[in-house]
């Protein structure tokens, strides 16, 4: 099945490569390759086009993991000019494969540089999203259960059969949560924690969409499980008509996920691709990041929506791992996880 998936990715990317172009009817066009969660109103792109003379052709491709795989497989013949959405769990792989060209935007020092992962400036941070367990407050209250506050609580019998997570092999937030447990328990002990989660009835699904909108009881799908791996910012989307958040994030289970943009090495239209990277960290775009993609902007001084102040406070000490550790161990950790959880 994995082989079939890989072949489909290759076929899709080759098709996309054949249709990639920097010129269309004489117009300057930049092909932006990104993940399925990238959202921006067409009017914003139209305004950028009017200001710069550059049309942005947005092409979406799965989540951050699928996007990175696609960029690596096509690095010899890039499928676009610029990419957005490679996160810090996959950035080291893309950099090791030479996917991105060097470029440091003039505004990099206004926030993005704090999240730099590469001394050569091949990636520019665009947004931050802390992956955390979210809880359905009303359902837990109805069962006379307190809100869990830690990793240990999630493995407690009081919360048996309540947690749904995304598969780390196929999902970026799923991989981030796996790394949160590696950071918390250490390289030796994290598999034992996952054995306890398995014994406590954790459910694994392929991706965030299924976990949050179908299995989680606190969102529109009204699924059966009141605990889900999502984002610290997700509760801002679940504020009731009374102005109160119906869900909350467990801030001691968070892993910091940073998403980056970069000019693709060997791209046909690198000059205009750099202008798109500039645009993604501009005040205009950064002001839209919170409400359009439910993540935090990286540029300093960008105000968050009012509802976020109450519903989505940022975790003070989210877990993280050095990029070199992720690069050296990512695939091994996933295989270990498969052995423990899939068995």
Image: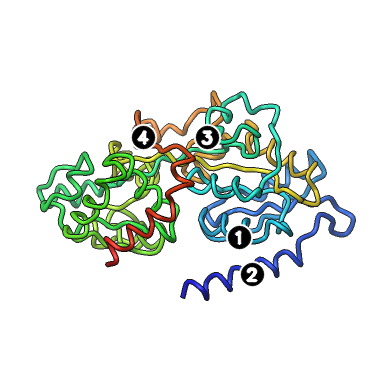
Image-based side of 281 in relation to 315, left or right: right
In three-dimensional space, the C-alpha distance between marks 1 and 4, rounded to whole angstroms, equals 29 Å
- Which mark is first along the chain, 2 or 4? 2
Res. 73 image quadrant: bottom right
Check whether the beta carbons of the residues at disc 3 and disc 4 lie within 8 A of each other: no
Q: Residues within 10 Å of mark 3 (few under 14, many from 20)?
A: many
- Which mark is first along the chain, 1 or 2? 2
Q: Residues within 10 Å of mark 1 (few under 14, many from 20)?
A: many
- Which mark is first along the chain, 2 or 3? 2
In three-dimensional space, the C-alpha distance between marks 3 and 2, rounded to whole angstroms, equals 31 Å
Q: Which residue in the protein does label 4 denote?
A: 318
Check whether the beta carbons of the residues at disc 2 and disc 1 lie within 8 A of each other: yes
The quarter of the rendered structure image containing the C terminus is bottom left
Query: What percent of the width, then of the height, locates residue 43?
Result: 68, 47
Label 2: element kind: helix
- 3 or 4: mark nearer the eye: 4
Residue at position x 46%, y 34% in the image: 305
In the image, which disc is placed on residue 297?
Answer: 3
Residue nearest the viewer, comparing 1 with 113: 1
Residue at position x 80%, y 41% in the image: 271
In three-dimensional space, the C-alpha distance between marks 4 and 2, rounded to whole angstroms, equals 36 Å
In three-dimensional space, the C-alpha distance between marks 3 and 4, rounded to whole angstroms, equals 16 Å
- Which mark is first along the chain, 4 or 3? 3
Label 4: element kind: loop
Q: Which residue in the protein does label 2 denote?
A: 12
Residue at position x 68%, y 56% in the image: 75
Check whether the beta carbons of the residues at disc 4 and disc 2 lie within 8 A of each other: no
Q: Which residue in the protein does label 1 denote?
A: 70
């Amino acid at each position: 099945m994995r082989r079939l998936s890989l072949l489909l990715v290759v076929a899709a990317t080759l098709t996309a490569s054949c249709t990639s172009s920097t010129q269309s009817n004489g117009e300057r066009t930049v092909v932006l390759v990104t993940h399925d969660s990238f959202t921006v109103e067409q009017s914003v792109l139209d305004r950028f086009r009017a200001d710069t003379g550059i049309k942005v052709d947005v092409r979406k491709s799965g989540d951050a993991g699928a996007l990175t795989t696609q960029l690596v497989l096509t690095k010899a013949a890039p499928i676009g000019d610029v990419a957005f959405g490679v996160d810090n769990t996959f950035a080291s792989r893309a950099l090791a494969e030479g996917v991105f060209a060097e470029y440091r935007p003039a505004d990099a020092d206004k926030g993005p540089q704090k999240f730099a992962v590469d001394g050569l400036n091949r990636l520019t941070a665009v947004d931050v999203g802390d992956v955390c367990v979210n809880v359905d407050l009303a359902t837990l209250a109805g069962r006379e259960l307190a809100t869990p506050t830690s990793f240990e609580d999630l493995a407690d019998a009081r919360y048996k059969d309540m947690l749904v997570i995304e598969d780390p092999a196929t999902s970026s937030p799923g991989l981030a949560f796996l790394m949160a447990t590696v950071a918390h328990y250490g390289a030796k002990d994290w598999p034992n924690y996952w054995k306890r989660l398995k014994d406590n009835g954790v459910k694994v699904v392929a991706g965030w969409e299924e976990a949050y909108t179908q299995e989680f009881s606190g969102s529109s799908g009204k699924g059966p499980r009141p605990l889900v791996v999502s984002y610290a910012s997700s509760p801002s989307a679940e504020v009731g008509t009374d102005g109160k958040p119906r869900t909350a994030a467990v801030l001691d289970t968070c892993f910091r996920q940073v998403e980056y943009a970069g000019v693709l090495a060997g791209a046909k239209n690198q000059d205009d691709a750099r202008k798109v990277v500039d645009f993604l960290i501009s005040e205009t775009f950064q002001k839209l990041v919170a409400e359009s993609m439910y993540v935090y902007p990286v540029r300093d001084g960008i105000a968050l929506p009012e509802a976020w102040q109450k519903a989505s406070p940022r975790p003070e000490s989210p877990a993280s791992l050095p990029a070199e550790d992720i690069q050296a161990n990512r695939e091994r950790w996933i295989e270990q996880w498969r052995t423990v959880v899939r068995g």
